[in-house]
Image: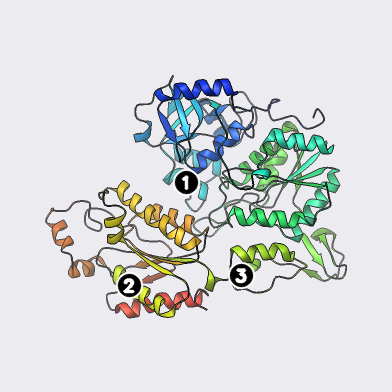
């Protein structure tokens, strides 16, 4: 493997210890404090342990963290653009101290690694957002996670791995850097072009990747992300089946498919450089960087968060130093006269060109319309249709939010009855009071407990949506951030329609069917939404209704009309 590009920093830092040391750590761990990692932290840990994040040997200390934010470098000068940190809440971090060994566990409690805790520090997360993402706008998913979901305390220190996180899907494709390098060596590849994707691949992508490999005289690694991607992306199970389907159309022995358990930050230019370093660790000498690579889309004003070519410019700036070559993504177009794909800048003048945007492909899928074979292979389209049927057959969550007494539950019950009259998809109502009684009876009304209750509703709704049903949710759900979390979760499985029941406070209070407003005004109830606890109104709900002058049937009809317009009821 001497002819392959060397790992970043010169050595592949595989952090999983041998069996004897693993037994020692297991025996000692009964005395260790433990941390259960979330999905994003598990992705980061896996790439630390398998060497994908070489030269890192653990979570960044404050000196390295500050250097990364300021200069895209570690404190020793090594190029590294993205802060890899272990965040915790203040409550979870309480009692931890430098010098301790901390067990890092998955959601089921299995110990995956031990953190030798060197530092505990509290970052300026707004500064981090501006440095890492170029913005503090919560329309950026990386910023929203950092400011609203990440803990306020960071732990730093060296990590010893006991085992890699467990996966039971596509195990033959989950190759570590050492395994991809061995595979390249076995096939005699000395140069390798890596292609990063979080979307299904179609014929333009195949033609682009083959052309890139041919120009570099290199093998080709299709390396899709199967960790965390952009909210609303197609689930990785469907995407991997699509990659396996399109792999049948590549020349034999010219392409390798492997899955990357990365938690994307959608960080644009910095993320593109990070991706190039990760692929260098996997043995790739070349990396395809697309237009608006890892871009999250638009900000809160509808403007692009990143210049479309900023990612290519940043990677080019560091290209000579990191040793990995950038291959700029060339837009491909189907030239009908020649029945082949060509880069748009090579299309002969006057030729008939066909293009299909990603937005148009998604529209055709959602509406059950045909997708032409010049754009997509039939076996790939079949996989997409199997997992993502047209809107009338998709799962759907209708998420009501509004003050107590606004009419949410009544309108939701009318909607439930109307859906049951129609038949077809199974429908379930998750009323806020009923859920509290049956799933969240131990919770109070602090902000933390309210958010936990709404997350539970979101989880149940996501399972219903995932399995093709309709979930009607009717909690107060006063806080925007947790409503956004639920949208992000559910849109990975089907439709999500937020309904703001915006009945004014004075009308809700005049109704006061349960006598709660009177008790709140008398001080008998505290932290009551709208009185002494805020209600954060939705900024851009799909439907907004005021039940002051609408009957429940009329209000429910407004929701049904929106669903019909959007294609969910055809």
Judge depth for marks 3 and 1 and give the one in front: 3
Q: What residue does disc 3 label?
A: 363
Residue 83 appears in which quarter of the rendering? top right
Quadrant of the drawing holding the N terminus: top right
**Residue 191 visible in rendering:** yes
Percent coordinates x, y for residue 162 in the rendering: 55, 28
User: Which residue lies at the image location 65% right of the left edge and 74% below the top edge?
Assistant: 369
Q: Secondary structure at mark 3?
A: helix
Q: Are marks 1 and 2 in contact (CB under 8 Å)?
A: no
In the picture, measured across the screen, residue 260 lies left or right of residue 93, that is: right
In the picture, measured across the screen, residue 136 lies left or right of residue 514, that is: right
**Residue 117 visible in rendering:** no
Percent coordinates x, y for residue 20 in the rendering: 57, 20
Judge depth for marks 2 and 3 and give the one in front: 2
Q: What residue does disc 1 label?
A: 145
Percent coordinates x, y for residue 378 in the rendering: 73, 66
User: Which residue lies at the image location 63% right of the left edge and 26% below the top edge?
Assistant: 77
Q: What residue does disc 2 label?
A: 413
Q: Earlier in the sequence, mark 1 or mark 2?
A: 1
Q: CA distance from mark 1 to mark 2?
A: 34 Å
In the picture, measured across the screen, residue 113 lies left or right of residue 224, that is: left
Compared with residue 1, is residue 474 higher up or lower down, i.e. above or below? below
Q: Secondary structure at mark 2?
A: helix
Q: CA distance from mark 3 to mark 1?
A: 28 Å
User: Which residue lies at the image location 39% right of the left edge and 67% below the top edge?
Assistant: 428
Q: Earlier in the sequence, mark 3 or mark 1?
A: 1
Q: CA distance from mark 2 to mark 3?
A: 31 Å
Compared with residue 26, is residue 285 higher up or lower down, i.e. above or below? below
Nearest to the observer: residue 335 or residue 475: 475
Compared with residue 277, is residue 480 higher up or lower down, i.e. above or below? below
User: Which residue lies at the image location 68% right of the left edge and 73% below the top edge?
Assistant: 370
Label 3 crowding class (10 Å Cα cut-off): few <14, some 14-19, many 20+? some
């Amino acid at each position: 493997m001497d002819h392959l590009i060397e790992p970043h920093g010169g050595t592949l830092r595989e952090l999983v210890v041998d069996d004897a040391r693993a037994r020692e750590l297991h025996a000692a761990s009964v005395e260790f404090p433990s941390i259960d990692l979330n999905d994003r932290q598990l992705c980061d840990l896996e790439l630390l342990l398998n060497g994908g994040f070489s030269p890192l040997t653990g979570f960044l200390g404050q000196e390295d963290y500050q250097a990364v934010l300021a200069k895209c470098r570690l404190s020793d000068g090594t190029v590294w653009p993205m802060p890899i940190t272990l965040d915790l809440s203040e409550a979870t971090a309480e009692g931890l101290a430098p010098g301790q060994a901390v067990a890092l566990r998955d959601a089921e409690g299995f110990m995956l690694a031990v953190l030798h805790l060197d530092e505990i520090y509290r970052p300026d997360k707004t500064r981090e957002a501006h440095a890492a993402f170029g913005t503090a706008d919560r329309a950026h998913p990386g910023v929203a996670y950092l400011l609203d979901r990440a803990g306020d305390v960071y732990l730093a220190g060296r990590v010893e791995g006991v085992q890699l996180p467990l996966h039971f899907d596509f195990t033959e494709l989950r190759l570590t850097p050492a395994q991809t390098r061995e595979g390249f060596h076995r096939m005699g590849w000395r140069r390798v072009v890596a292609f990063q994707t979080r979307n299904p691949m179609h014929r333009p992508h195949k033609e682009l990747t083959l052309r890139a490999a041919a120009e570099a005289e290199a093998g080709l690694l299709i390396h899709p992300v199967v960790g965390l991607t952009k909210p609303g992306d197609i689930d990785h199970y469907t995407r991997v089946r699509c990659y396996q389907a399109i792999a049948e159309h590549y020349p034999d022995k010219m392409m390798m498919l492997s899955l990357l358990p990365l938690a994307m930050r959608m960080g644009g230019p910095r993320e593109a450089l990070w991706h190039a370093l990760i692929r260098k660790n996997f043995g790739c000498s070349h990396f395809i960087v697309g237009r608006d690579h890892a871009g999250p889309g638009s900000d809160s004003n509808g403007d692009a968060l990143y210049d479309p070519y900023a990612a290519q410019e940043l990677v080019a700036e560091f290209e000579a130093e990191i040793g990995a070559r950038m291959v700029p993504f060339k837009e491909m177009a189907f030239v009908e006269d020649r029945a082949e794909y060509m880069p748009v800048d090579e299309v002969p003048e006057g030729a008939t060109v066909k293009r299909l945007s990603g937005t148009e492909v998604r529209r055709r899928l959602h509406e059950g319309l045909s997708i032409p074979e010049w754009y997509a292979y039939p076996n790939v389209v079949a996989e997409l249709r199997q997992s993502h049927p047209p809107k009338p057959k998709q799962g759907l969550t209708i998420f009501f939010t509004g003050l107590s007494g606004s009419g949410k539950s009544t309108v939701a019950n009318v909607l439930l009855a109307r859906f049951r009259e129609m038949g077809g998809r199974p429908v379930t109502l998750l009323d806020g009071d009923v859920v509290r009684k049956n799933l969240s009876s131990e919770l109070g009304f602090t902000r933390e407990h309210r958010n936990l209750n709404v997350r539970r509703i979101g989880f149940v709704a996501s399972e219903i949506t995932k399995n093709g049903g309709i979930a009607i949710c009717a909690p107060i759900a006063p806080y925007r951030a947790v409503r956004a979390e639920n949208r992000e979760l559910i849109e990975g499985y089907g439709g999500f329609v937020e309904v703001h029941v915006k009945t004014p406070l004075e009308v809700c209070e005049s109704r006061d069917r349960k006598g709660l407003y009177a008790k709140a005004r008398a001080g008998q109830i505290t932290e009551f939404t709208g009185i002494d606890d805020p209600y954060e109104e939705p900024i851009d709900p799909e439907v907004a209704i005021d039940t002051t002058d609408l009957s429940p049937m009329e209000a429910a009809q407004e929701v049904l009309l929106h669903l019909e317009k959007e294609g969910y009821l055809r």
